[in-house]
Image (cartoon, grey):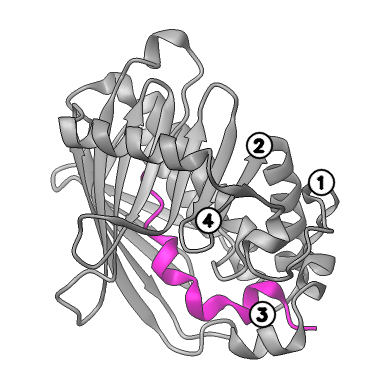
Amino acid sequence: MKSRAVKYAKFALLFAISCLVIPQCNTPNLLGQDFRIDSQVYVEGKSLPVSENITLFSSGVIYDFQLSDNGESETEETVIFNSRLKTFTLLNHANRTKLDLVDLELLSIYEGVRKETRQDHRSRFLTDDTFVEDIDMTANLVTLSSPQIEYCYSGSQPAKVSILEQYNEFLHYFTMLNVSDPTKVPPFARMELNKSIKRLGWIPTEIRISVEQNSLFREAFKAKSKHTVRYQLSKKDQARIESIKKRWSQYKPVYLAEYRGFKKEPKLKIPEIKTASFEEEISSDQREKK
């Protein structure tokens, strides 16, 4: 059986740099800090973004909307994170299904994927390689380099530093969320980038990633993401939140395997998922499609 990390690496890198949009806060005085982050992901050689997100932070709940090509309406999936309860709700708009995931369930999956990634010699560098950090405060530029991956980001402290706790909690939880989707790369290298961002107290405006061709990635890869913070929500933002609240309750609750499309019957309960058996739930014809 191929490693989960190897099998789905082709789909991974577009998501490796786009996880900058959903935090958590723990103290009541931070729950009122409403703001918005707009994000776009670009692949080298393309002038138009390959994905766009609007993330709205409102009263301790975060709403992450993937946008359609016109940049207006949400498409595919919306992620909602309740920072007080530490729960994710994922909404699949095409299938009208929803998945609820608490942090302990996510941590269990995360540790299983980490163990599997480390055991495979082709993907072990994602967990074991050390990053060297170089900070150029004059240019507000930070480079994190390992033998296989290089991150380079620019940014600064936000105008309202009170949002940093929420933002940094996101960098932990939303990056972890990638392990619930086998079409995304295991997030362990990205976690090192998150630590650097938190140490500096920055919110990046641009992140670039460069990956060498290796046993996991058949081709070298370069991409970048851009991020803009807005310190208040517009009436249109508020309307978007109210709209998703109304649809949210109408969606069918399902288990992780069904939500990701691996099987029709929700026989597999989330707490029982281990990464090896999780991949076994994918039928051979579905693997061919992936």
Q: Name above or below for residue 278 compared with residue 54.
A: below
Q: Give the residue pinned by disc 4.
A: 96
Q: Which residue is mark 1?
A: 271
Q: Nearer the viewer, mark 3 or mark 1?
A: 1
The C terminus sits in image quarter: bottom right
Q: Residue at coordinates 69% horizontally, 73% vertically from top-left?
A: 4
Q: Earlier in the sequence, mark 3 or mark 1?
A: 3
Give the CA separation, mark 3 to mark 2.
29 Å
- N-terminal of the pair, mark 3 or mark 4, is 4
- Label 2 sits on what residue type? Asp
Question: Which one is in front in this view, the residue at disc 3 or the one at disc 4?
Answer: 4
Callout 3 secondary element: loop
Amino acid marked by disc 4: Arg
Q: What whole-number distance in Å separates the C-alpha atoms at marks 3 and 1? A: 28 Å
18 part of magenta stretch? yes
**In this rendering, would 113 be left or right of 84?**
right
Numbered range of the magenta stretch: 1-21
Look at mark 2 in the image and give the residue it sits on. 103
Tag 4: Cα neighbours inside 10 Å, few (<14), some, or many (≥20)? some
**Mark 2–mark 4 contact, CB under 8 Å?**
no
* Of the two numbered discs 2 and 4 in the rendering, the one whose residue sits closer to the viewer: 4
Name which of mark 2 and mark 4 comes first in the sequence: 4
- Find out whether residue 240 is within the magenta segment: no
| Image location of residue 56, percent across then percent down | 31, 36
| Left-right relation of 36 to 196 | left
Q: Look at the picture and state if 160 lies above or below 77.
A: above
Q: Is residue 26 above or below residue 47?
A: above
Q: Amino acid at mark 3?
A: Arg
Residue 171: x %, y % from top left: 45, 41
Distance from label 1 to label 4 (Cα)?
A: 23 Å
Toward the viewer: 10 or 244?
244
